[in-house]
Image (cartoon, rainbow, N blue to C red):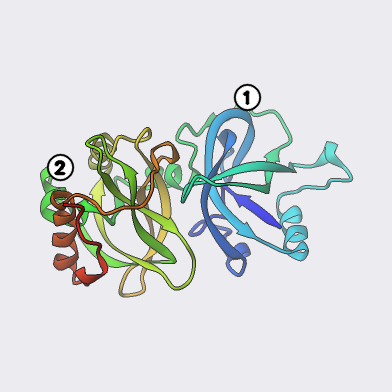
Amino acid sequence: MKIFAYGTLLKGMSRSGVLCRSRFMGHGFTNGALYDLGAYPAIGEGSKIVYGELYEIDEKKLRELDRIEGCCLEDKHHSLYLRKQADITMLDDGSQESAYTYFYNHDLDDYHRIVCGDYRRYTLEKLSDKQWYIAYGSNMSSERLHERIGETHEIKAGYMEGYRLMFNKKADNGGVYANIAYVGSGCRCPFAAYLISKEQLYQLDRYEGEPSHYVRIGIWFSDLTGESNIGHVYVANTDKLTQNQNPLHGYLRYIHTGYEEHGFDTNDLPKSAE
């Protein structure tokens, strides 16, 4: 069976160890409204978007999750959360999945709503003025990124394990831009992570057309030294997905530059469409 995690169970968050041996299936979203309850978040009924991760679990793990979430289906009145089926849209390809998730079983009117719909992103933005931004496309080139937002504080390189670099985000000029999709073991996508200010991050939001073109979500990542962090990454809005194809030469040149700068093999990149 499948479970949709949206709070402390997410990778890199306080209870991520609970699902660390369960099969991760990718990033997705469901409809609802996300609230900050202090030590953890909660989904309430609503029509907004809530982002999270999809996992495959067994009956034993489901029972464990019920205990953690204070969910007792035989005594719904005294349950903290209620486990319900939800429709999940996968960010990787826009496909639909059905999964359990936990909805808060009490009134949420007095709590702060998390407008971005992403608990990991929201938590990151509260912690520090400096944030990790994970670039896998044209912004891997530090020269291009600096032209957009100015100087950065630190750079790390690495691979997003299980992810594939795609060129399936519609461009206004009729071409395509870079995107990532989680496909599982056997794939990995090079990245350059830049430590930037929140003001610079908000500048990038404007460049990336967030959220109508790209959606910014929090993500757990590990660099080439094995050090792990949580950062921000832009993935294509599912409304902007198209068939994977070769990008235009001018755009691809930036990615080549970034690969060379950070020591990645450019032979892994596609040919240009021109």
Is any atom of residue 247 visible in this view?
yes
Q: Residue at x 77, y 47 (%)?
A: 71
Is any atom of residue 264 visible in this view?
no
The CA span between labels 2 and 1 is 40 Å
Image spot of residue 208 (x, y percent): 28, 39
Q: Say the numbered circle drawn on residue 101.
A: none
Q: Disc 1 marks which residue?
A: 109
Task: Name above or below for residue 77 compared with residue 267.
Answer: above
> What is the residue that sits farthest to the top in this orientation?
109
Image spot of residue 77 (x, y percent): 84, 36
Image spot of residue 159 (x, y percent): 34, 68
Q: Residue at x 38, y 48 (%)?
A: 243
Tell me whether the residue at label 2 lies in contact with that at label 1, contact meaning CB atoms closer than 8 angstroms.
Answer: no
| Secondary element at image label 1 | loop
Q: Nearer the viewer, residue 84 or 265?
A: 265
Q: Disc 2 marks which residue?
A: 148
| Secondary element at image label 2 | helix
Q: Quadrant of residue 165?
A: bottom left
Amino acid type of the residue tagged 2 in the rendering: Arg
Is 1 placed left or right of 238 in the picture?
A: right
Is 31 placed left or right of 243 in the picture?
A: right
Q: Earlier in the sequence, mark 2 or mark 1?
A: 1
Amino acid type of the residue tagged 1 in the rendering: Asp
